[in-house]
Image (cartoon, rainbow, N blue to C red):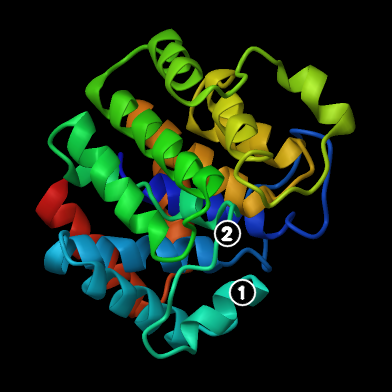
Amino acid sequence: MKGIIGTIAGDIIGSTYEFHPIKTKEFSLFNKRSTFTDDTIMTLAVAKWLLNDKNSKEELVRQLQSFGNKYPNGGYGRMFKQWLRTDHPKPYGSWGNGSAMRVSPVAWVGDSLEEVQKLAKLSSVVTHDHPEGVKGALATADAVYLARLGSSKEEIREHIEIRYDYDLSRTLDEIRPYYKFDVSCQGSVPESIICFLEADDYEDTIRNCVSLGGDADTMAAIAGGIAAAYWEVPKDIQYKSIERLSYDLLNVLIEFENKFL
């Protein structure tokens, strides 16, 4: 299976290691503490927005607030928590990687790179309207879309480097020893893309992300979304991720797959 299951599985696998960082690729993918977090919740909120009315900013805000308030313990940032509880909420200048973690569905809905970018920007600016926040969402969505079209890794790398000025020439072995927890788009999205570029398959992508010892669930969600457009997500990873979803989240995933995949 391809699609946004790659984002969801990455989040669930990475959830165990978000606050217990490791610097190795040798770890158990799932354990009793593996669970979905805000990355999955907000990704499926974006998916529901796209199912209902992809051109409506009001519908996007409604779905983000609806999903966020239904799952208040998802692990949201302080400013986003406040945004969820606000009537007529406004963007708050965030450059956090929340814009990138939730964006992958737009790359399966847009019929062109231009439409994907339009949807990606809209999905970001209702909260993350800082240029770096928007940039992180755009770069992630572009990578997913290009992978979906069958572009090579080098074509994806070149596009992201030229258009978004991210340095993707570094290796994970160079990054890993000094990398720390970083929730900014500028400090996590390029590294997440590199995790995909260096990988041999979907699982290897996720192991790369966790091994950096950073914001493991979000980075695995970002890179997993790209990897799941480039490769198939293994069935055992699919099943173990799906069984950890609530029924309403699973129903949105199924509805999205049936309509767009």
**Residue 86, horizontal then vertical, whole percent:** 46, 88
Q: Is residue 251 visible?
A: yes
Q: Could you tell me which residue is drawn at 17 percent across and 59 percent down?
A: 54
Q: Could you tell me which residue is drawn at 61 percent across and 74 percent down?
A: 79
Q: Classify residue 15 as left or right of residue 165.
A: right
Instruction: State the residue position of label 2.
Output: 94
- Tell me, for residue 79, which label it has, or none: 1
Q: Classify residue 49 as left or right of residue 207.
A: left
**Residue 246, horizontal then vertical, whole percent:** 41, 77
**Residue 28, horizontal then vertical, whole percent:** 70, 47
Precedes in sequence: disc 1 or disc 2: 1
Asked whether disc 1 touches disc 2, contact meaning CB atoms under 8 Å apart, the reply is yes
Q: Could you tell me which residue is drawn at 36 percent across and 85 percent down?
A: 88
Q: Residue furthest right?
A: 177
Amino acid type indicated by mark 1? Met
Amino acid type indicated by mark 2? Ser
SS state under label 1: helix
Q: Could you tell me which residue is drawn at 51 percent across and 79 percent down?
A: 83
* Quadrant including the C terminus: top left
Q: Classify residue 61 as left or right of residue 89.
A: left
Above or below 72: residue 163: above
* Quadrant including the N terminus: top left
- Tell me, for residue 175, which label it has, or none: none
Q: Nearer the viewer, residue 109 or 126?
A: 126
